[in-house]
Image (cartoon, helix red, strand yellow):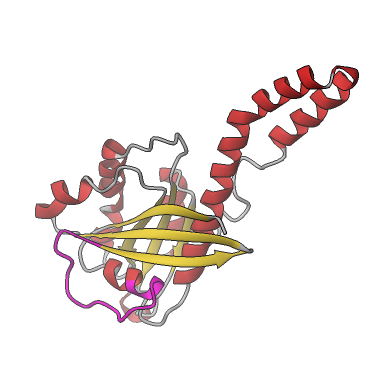
């Protein structure tokens, strides 16, 4: 059994529900205390007969921990940018967090991370100040991969957002790998099968282009 290992990071202001979101994903008791520095959990799951192990880093939202937490951005495959729909400042601060991530981020495999914007606490309808439309507009403005509204408290939308990110990044990575190795395969095929040069060349071109450039679920709203 081949198990693909991804690194995920959860970022955003303090008290937006990052720790509770991570605990829900890993099926542990929801956390109520603020994170100090960085906490790490591991989630294993199977999606469409493919096995994944995701190391999830939950970062502190306090400014004084920013230097410590940013060092964990490097090598991330999945990013969950979380805000609280009842607190507009946390929504506005997502731009700061994203800039901080992009400034520090580095991934040696050359594949762009899959970034999901998450609006939490939709169960608190009477206190809501950030609309769903605003969240989708921000996703488009920042050119993020996906946007979900969730309720960690009521366990709504969290696993859908997480599994979508894993699936879509795996597809993106496969596309990146295929694009980088496709021409080489085509060249080898041309030299190894001289009698069917034209046919082999065309089949390799189709192989390179058969994976879509973006996951079909990348703009889902949970």
Image quarter of residue 116: bottom left
Q: Is residue 95 left or right of residue 195?
A: left
Q: Position of residue 63 (x, y in %)?
A: 13, 53
Vertical placement of residue 47 versus 121, above or below: above
Image quarter of residue 41: bottom left
Towards the viewer: 60 or 188: 188
Vertical placement of residue 29 versus 166, above or below: below
Q: Is residue 86 left or right of residue 110?
A: left
Q: In the image as oriented, which residue stretches furthest toward the left?
A: 64
Residue at 31% across, 46% down: 98
Vertical placement of residue 140 versus 47, above or below: above
Q: Position of residue 108 (x, y in %)?
A: 39, 35
The answer to if 37 sits in the magenta stretch is yes
Could you tell me what secondary structure mostly forms the magenta stretch? loop
Towards the viewer: 45 or 167: 45
Vertical placement of residue 127 versus 129, above or below: below
Residue at 21% across, 45% down: 71
Q: In the image as oriented, which residue stretches furthest toward the right?
A: 195
Count of marks placed on residues: 0
Q: Position of residue 119 (x, y in %)?
A: 38, 65
Residue at 41% across, 44% down: 142
Q: Is residue 102 left or right of residue 197?
A: left
Towards the viewer: 128 or 117: 117
Image quarter of residue 117: bottom left
């Amino acid at each position: 059994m081949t198990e693909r290992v991804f690194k995920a990071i959860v970022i955003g202001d303090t008290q937006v529900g990052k720790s509770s979101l991570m605990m829900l994903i890993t099926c542990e008791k929801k956390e109520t205390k603020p994170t100090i520095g960085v906490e790490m959990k591991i989630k294993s799951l199977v999606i469409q007969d493919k096995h994944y192990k995701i190391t999830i880093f939950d970062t502190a939202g306090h400014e004084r921990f920013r230097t410590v937490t940013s060092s964990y951005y490097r090598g991330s495959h999945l990013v969950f940018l979380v805000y609280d729909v009842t607190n507009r400042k946390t929504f506005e601060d997502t731009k700061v967090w994203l800039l901080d991530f992009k400034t520090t981020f580095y991934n040696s495999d050359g594949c762009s991370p899959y970034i999901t914007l998450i609006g939490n606490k939709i169960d608190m309808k009477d206190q809501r100040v950030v609309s769903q439309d605003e969240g989708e507009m921000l996703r488009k403005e920042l050119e993020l991969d996906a946007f979900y509204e969730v309720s960690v408290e009521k366990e709504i939308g969290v696993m859908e957002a997480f599994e979508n990110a894993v699936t879509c990044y795996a597809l993106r990575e496969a596309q990146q790998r295929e694009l980088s190795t496709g021409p080489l395969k085509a060249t080898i095929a041309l030299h190894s099968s001289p009698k069917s040069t034209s046919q082999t060349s065309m089949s390799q071109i189709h192989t390179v282009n058969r994976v879509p450039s973006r996951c079909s679920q990348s703009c889902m709203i949970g």
